Each structure stands twice: as C-alpha cells, then as structure tokens.
Image: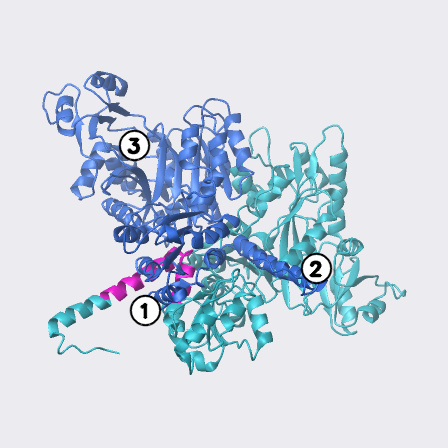
Chain colours: A cyan, B blue
Amino acid sequence: MLGAAASLLNIKVLVLDSGDSAPAKQVIAPTPPLSHVDGKFTDEESVRQLASQVDVLTVEIEHVNAQVLEDIMKDSSRPIQVHPHPSTIKIIQNKLTQKRHLTKYGVPVVDCQEVIASSADPSTSMQGAIKTLGLPLMLKSQTLAYDGRGNYVVETEDDVGKAQTALGDRPLYAERWAPFVKEIAVMIVRSASGTVVSYPAVETVHKENICHIVFAPLRGTDQELDGKARRVAEKAIQTFEGAGVFGVEMFLMPDGEILVNEIAPRPHNSGHYTIEACYSSQYENHLRAILDLPLGSTELRVPAAVMLNLIGASSDMSEITRVCQKALTVPGAAIHLYGKSESRKGRKMGHITIVGNSEAEVRSRLRPLLEALPDNDPTSTEQYAPLPPQIGFSHRYPLVGVIMGSDSDLPVMLPGARILDKFSIPYELTIVSAHRTPDRLVNYARSAAARGLRVIIAGAGGAAHLPGMVASMTALPVIGVPVKGSSLDGVDSLHSIVQMPRGIPVATVAINNGTNAGLLAARILGSSDPQLLKATEAYSRNLEKEVLGKVDNLAAVGWEKYEVKK
Amino acid sequence: MLGAAASLLNIKVLVLDSGDSAPAKQVIAPTPPLSHVDGKFTDEESVRQLASQVDVLTVEIEHVNAQVLEDIMKDSSRPIQVHPHPSTIKIIQNKLTQKRHLTKYGVPVVDCQEVIASSADPSTSMQGAIKTLGLPLMLKSQTLAYDGRGNYVVETEDDVGKAQTALGDRPLYAERWAPFVKEIAVMIVRSASGTVVSYPAVETVHKENICHIVFAPLRGTDQELDGKARRVAEKAIQTFEGAGVFGVEMFLMPDGEILVNEIAPRPHNSGHYTIEACYSSQYENHLRAILDLPLGSTELRVPAAVMLNLIGASSDMSEITRVCQKALTVPGAAIHLYGKSESRKGRKMGHITIVGNSEAEVRSRLRPLLEALPDNDPTSTEQYAPLPPQIGFSHRYPLVGVIMGSDSDLPVMLPGARILDKFSIPYELTIVSAHRTPDRLVNYARSAAARGLRVIIAGAGGAAHLPGMVASMTALPVIGVPVKGSSLDGVDSLHSIVQMPRGIPVATVAINNGTNAGLLAARILGSSDPQLLKATEAYSRNLEKEVLGKVDNLAAVGWEKYEVKK
C-alpha cells in the first residue's frame, strides 16, 4: 500500500522482503541497476544492501535491528535519512520501555511493572506485581509481541506458572487489567520538523487479539471524545524523534479516561480506512512526512467508513475469496487483497473498506460481509451490523432524532416518523420533556451530534420550550412542530417555537404538521445526498399526480356527486 | 491505473507496451513464467504473444489491428475472451463508420458526410460537403485521430487546400460545425450480458483539442440534463457488442439538444475523476465488466470533484513537478504521475483530481494549480476557478440562495447574508417576486438543485407566498423569513409562511429574523460538513461568552448604572 502511494508520486521505492513475490514487490518494479533485496528485515547484511541504494530508509515493522539502522544513519561515507528515528524504534519495540517513556512525559498509560521470573524483589517479582496491580492482570512479553502474541491473561495465582511457560524466557512485564468500554485508535503524522497532525479517532474491534473491524468516525455520547483522544495521541507522538506516521491504540475507560495501550511507529491496520475515507491516506502522509513534503489533509472525505480485515481461518484461500465475491455486490466496498500466495490461520490476507453516507449505511453494508466470513460469529454480526429495527422501534444508528415533550404528542409526531420510514431514513423516537426531564434534555441535546444525529425534530405544545432549548444546546438543525393544545388553537405553541431570539434558530413547521417535519428532515438530509434528493422530488411529483387524479375525478363525476375524502 | 485496480483484486495482469519501463509495467510484476511483452500494440506478433499467455484480452487504445483480435478470439485451439469485442473496435476506430452506426440506431450525432479528395460527386466531394453542411466545418481524418490530431477547421473555401495537405492522404470526412455551449461526457460500463450503467455526466473542457479539465457533477440550469446525457450515452453503448467501459463525449447545443461527438471503447480521460470521486472507479468497473463480475456502484461518493490534466508544455519535466508541488499543499488533491521518463509538448504526464464539499470549494482549490501550469492562461483561470466575489455580490457557485420578494425586504435579509459571509458559505442574493415575477420564480426554484444550491432562504412580507411557492417547486430545504409589513405586525407573513399544507414544508424562522435564517442554513449545511458544524458550535459558545460578559458587567457596575446596549 505504501508502494502504491509512492508510484502515484513517481517516488522510486526499493523493498527488502523475503522472496521475489513479496506483496510490495508485485506492485513496484525497480529501475535497473537498482534492485529489491531478497532477505529478512532482521538480517544486517540485507538491511545494508537496501540502505546502499536509497536516500531515505523507512521501516514498516518495528521488530528490526535498530542499532544497525542507527549505524547506517551515522555512517558519514554515504549519509541517508532513516525514519522513524532508530531511537524511536528502540523505545517502541520494547513495550515496557515504551510505557515508561510515555509515563515520563505525562502520557496516561495502564499501570505496569517489570517481572523477572526468578526475582524475589517485590518490585520485580510476579508476586509483587499481583500485589500492586491486582488480579486479573496481563503478563506480556516486553519484545517481539504483536497481534496478541506474547500476551497472557493471569486470572488467578494458579495461572502464573502456565503464563511463564507460555511466554518462555523472553523479558516480561505485568500490566493492570484494563476493563475498557471501547478500544480506540488515532493515526498521527509527524513531520521531520516535529509537527504532529492527527487523523480522526476511530473505534477498533479486536478478535482473538487481532484487529478485526475499524469504524470511522468514532461515535459516542461524549462530544469531546474525538478531541480528547486526538490530543492524547498527539502528545504521545510529540515525545519521539523522526518523521512518519504512528498508530496509537488506546483504551476508553468507564470513567471517560483515555489510556494509551501501545504505539506502532509505522502505517497501521487501524489506519487502512484512510485510503478511501480521508483526503490523504496514512501511506501518502507517511511518504510526505519522511520526504519532508507538505503534509496532506487528514480530514474525512466521506461521512462514514468501516474497515474489515480479511484474516485467514485456514489454508483454504477460497474462504477469503468468498468474502471478496460478496463485497463485489456491496456499493462502496473497496477490496484490498495483498497478493499473499498462501492463506493460513491468523494471517492478514487483505482488507475491505466500505464507505457510505451514514453509520447506519456502512453497518448495513458490512452485514453480508460478516456473514460471509469463514469463522463468522452471529452474535458479533448482531453487535456490529444489526438489521434495521422493526417499524415502531428506534434505529441504533439514527440520523434523525424525533422527540416530543409528552406521549400525548405522539399522534402528531407519528406521521413524521412514517415519512422517515418511507424514505428509509434511520431515526429514533422518544420522549424528552423540557420541564419534567430537564437533565435528560441537556444530555440528549449535548450528545446528539457526537452520536451521529444530523437533524432533530422536536414537537411540543403550550409553552413549547423543547425545540428551542434543544437548539440552544446543539449546532444541528432543529425542526419544531407546534402541537395544538387545549387552548389558543396551537398559536401559543407556534409562537413559542418560532419566535426564537437572534442566534438560535428553530425550523418551525405548521401547527400539528408532523408530516412536514418529517419531510423537512428528509429535504435537509437530501441536500447533501443526491439519491435522497431524487426520492423527495419523486414524492412531490406523486402529490401532483394525486391532485391531478382528483381533477379528473371531479370532471368525471361532476361536483354535485363528488365526495371529498378526509 | 488499470493495473493498480487489478492488483487490489489480485488479478494477474500482463502488459503489451514498448520498453521495460512503460508506465503499467512499473506497477505490475508478472509471476514467472508469465511475462510482459515488449512491443507495439500494432504489431501482430506481439499481440499474439500476449494473447498466448492470458484468458482475457483487453485494449486501452482503439487504434489496434481489430482483425488480429478477431482471429485470436476465433482461434479454437485456445479460446480466450477479447473485450471490447473486435467488431466494436472496428466500428469505433473509424469515426465516419462510428457516426453512421450511431445514426442507424437513432443516436443523435453531428451531421457529417464522407469526403474523397478527388471526388466530383457532390455526395462525397469537398464542395458537396460545404454545400450540405455549410461553413465553417470540420474536416476530419476517419482513422487514427485523437487529442485533436486529424482535425482541421475549414473556415472558408480557401482553407480546403490547406486542410487536405495537413491531413494527408488519410480517408476523410466533413462534419457540420457544432456551436456547442458545453462539452459533456459520460462513462458507461457495459457488462458481458449487455447491461449498461452510467457514471454521472461531467463537464469537460478542452485546450488545443486535448482534455484539460473535467468537472463532476455536471451543473446547469436544466434539472433534466444529467439524466438526458446519461440516457443518450447509454443508448449509444447499447448498440455495441462486448464488455468494458466506454467514454462518450457529447456536445450540449444551445437549444438543449445533446449530440454524441465521439466514443472511446476503453477507460477514458473524462473518467479519471472516478478513482477518487465514485464508489467504484472506471478501471475497477472495466475489470469487473470484462471478467463478468458484478458491476460496481457508479455513484459519486463526494459532493464535487475536478480533474486537471498534467500535459507537457516542453521537454522540461520541472514544469510538471512544479504543479505537483503546489498540489501537495491543496487539501483533497490527489496526484497521479504516470511514470513517463520524458516530458514533451502535448504529452499526458499525469493528472490531479481534487475532491471537496462543494463546487465552490473544488474550484477554489483548483485555482493555484491552474496558476502553476507551465502555459497558464489567466483568462481561463478566471473562467474556471474565479476568486470569491467581493462582499455584497453573488458567488458564481453558491450553496445557498438568498431571495426576497421585494428590495424593501433587504434590511431584514442582510443580517442573514452576513452570517453566511462569517462562515465563508458561498451564496447568491437576489430578488424573486412570487406575484410580480412568477416566471422567474418558477425558473429559479426548478433549476435550484441542478445549479448546485443546497438551501434556499426566502423572505417575504404580507401575503408572503414566496417561500411556500419555491418549496413547492424544489426538493431542497427552504427557509422562510416572515417580514414585518405595514399591518398585523408580521403575523400575517408568519402564518402565510408557516401554515403550509401537508407535503410541502417551509422551515420558518422568527419574524424579521434574517440572522436566524442564515444560521439555520449554516446548521443545515453543517449537518453534513463536520468543519462547518464545529464553526457553528463555536458561534454558539461565543454567544454564551457574550452574555456571561454582561453578567460580569452587571455585577460590576450594578443595575442602577448598567446601560443596555441596543
């Protein structure tokens, strides 16, 4: 993927990897006399052979010999640049060193401490760790650990022996158990001069410790979450040297705290979605960073995206092909097969990114792909890509929130809900009373945009404060429906809703006209969705046809016999 | 680009082109014993060498020996598929045959007739052509003509000799001069079973007969234009055999008629924008079509895109590099350099696609690139990428239309316009009176969406029919501003605007509150534009700060001395 990005910019790339058909070598033909290197990235001679041919050296895996890279960089006979800086790789490739480094710079991480098998010193013994960090805890290898390899969950003291056997004689450390509510990740670009910019925060879902699904952007009830996650990730990467992209994986804890789990000093699986979903991909920005070119925009260019990893379940390649064949029928799905000649359990064979107009859309497009996975778990399909709800129940990923001050407003709001059903717009419908549930009102309005809502329809009668109060606590467009009450024929509600002060608009529709509120929501969403715009145009043409039918009928039966339908 | 699309699907591709460093060979490494072919696409032996190694053969240029392809297809010893069908290539590679074919199937084309230099028969003589088609006319080579090579404009009878000399002894034909108002193009995908689907219609701009800029989607005042252009293009491609993508170039005539200019039976320059702007690119869909896989969605996944060709002006490669360096600073700009080792005048060295939230945005991002072109023409910069207008004048590519029934409404509407200025939202402001300019009203409302407007703000007083009538003739959201008239304190306007019948909503704001109309427009646009959403959130926080400042001031000076500012 880095090679594909480089070829668009005519940047010449040489690759060190084993074999002639390594994925990157399939899409980059070197210009003779330059040539790819056939070897292991851990082999000093191969690294030197690559370095002798290039101006800038970068790595896409951190388990390299950082000392060799440092020597190459310092070799004054032929100075080349190495990114990320070998010092950064050294810190990151040892997870304990990485966590201590982050802690030193005030970046929040999970508590941890070193564990030495034979130690009796409570500051380094397993018993000491259990005492300090509690149980369960994670026993982890300090080095050469990724995709869950090198991690062991110690639930009871009895597990200690098994854990140490499983992890072998590698240097270990223990980590406090982190009962996170969500895993999140942020890709960071660091320029040679140390400027850092972040991509949007995303939600990552792991399966057997391997990245399984990524959702962008991150949704939740905390309107500050994206900003908070990005600031933590930026702060972490500011502490390192050298240029390039970095993947920062984090835990969102139940109290809203964000802890850094681990950092990858390279393009990362949690950033694959950027190829289709952002203005500049992580790969293009990695190149820009290490070549000291202006950094590209990290903004999303689509409303929603989801990335699904294609991970081998066995040696049977047709299991992967089957998911891809399904993806060919899914609009917005981009298949990325890596050209690996053999599949095996746990091997990353490719990924599929789906982009769409909304969270609801990308999740509904994801569903058939999850179902086609070789080792599909129906529970997780329901969790991440549920079917739309039955009529009369709220969608889990709504674009429109329909709220009313009282259940007595339901008959007025129902026709609006039915309009949204007609246009297949995902929505939720509930009761929020300005005067009787003011805290709920605040929470609802403040979290609306972060939850992914784009329009709110609020109905209220009498003093009818709900629409205006919601509008004062969100920047989303709020549609107000004046509900006719017991007195004043609804004019009280109308004036309460429409006569908002300068600065806070409410889009007011006619008294009791829930239908028009639904249609206005559809028009608002349609203004940025050409398919929906066409659907609302067709709706108007149908109204015209209906009336023209009445014209004919009136002329046919005569007005004396014409019956007016209610 | 076809190779890059193929590698994502792990489709093995072999290339026939001259030299080892041909662009496609740089991004596709064949798996031995298969190998690319070094040769000319016109060389029979080379074509056969390629064919002997593949299951499906496709061409990216129509000037091939179609007979050889047909022979290969019919060779029963090793049957392979050839797409597009050689019969299609044969028809298309001769422009006169192509036009006669289209005419036979009722596809509208520019009138033309064969010209034989020595002929005295008026149906084939140059004089006969001038008599039938008038002057000026285009004298064109029937074959081997592209990028304007093989065309000659005959303005007067004196030009005839020069034209024939210039075009040599190739077979010729004459074409009626087509004084088009716009050049448009549509990419078509044709499956093996003959299903055709179209990409959105785009505007193409040529410079010295070479594709220069492409704008997607096509904008104009005719709401049916995109549909009409796509239907013409689909109809044209339905007449051919075989699978693949086809570029259909057309003229939009002053009377709204669409004429097919010419067809390319392959991925086409006018479809390069699809890589970044559509769900599936023309290249991916070409592969899907020729491999009989499900076709991908042709829908746009961004609101607006522009493609700029990078055409050599001389042998100086730095002229191209300079434009790319500028593009690195432009958000949403994707650089595609083709890896050609030498630049020369008229050679396509690459292209840049810019995507963005609106026509105004992509055009403003295009401007610095046009300015960096080696042979930049400032007039064309002003034409295609103008600076935003000065305050108080309408933007040429507005997202919001601010209209009012009378110039007396201006003081009420101005604060709304200023809100749009504050958020840098492109808009136009004008007078449309429902009762005094009813035809203008119809034209304005009916063309609004096709022109690219996304929201309309309409202000009116008294009977105040403007907002509702506009809403009944567009599917865009319409915001109504009731203007206080000489009687009834504006309640007459409010009720006229808000009390719309079921089916046609108007988003009504408070009486005389143009500010809130502007803010509501910003909120509506912001609901699909995260940056704008943030800006409107910041606006609300500023209102909060302002009032909190007054809180402090009131407490500081005491209410007896406090001065209320108007």
The part of the image, by quadrant, that contains residue A153 is: bottom right
Q: Residue at x 27, y 65 (%)?
A: A542
Magenta: predominant secondary structure element?
helix
Residue type at mark 2: give it: Asn
Mark 3 crowdedness (10 Å alpha carbons): few <14, some 14-19, many ≥20: some
- Mark 3: secondary structure: loop
Residue B495 image position (x, y, % from top left) = 37, 67
Residue type at mark 3: give it: Asn
**Residue beneath disc 3:** B65
Check chain identity for marks 2 and 1: say if they share one.
Answer: no
Give, as a single range, the part of the protein colored magenta: A518-545
- Mark 1: secondary structure: loop
- Mark 2: secondary structure: strand
**Residue beneath disc 2:** A261
Task: Locate the C terminus of chain B by quadrant.
Answer: bottom right
**Residue beneath disc 1:** B501
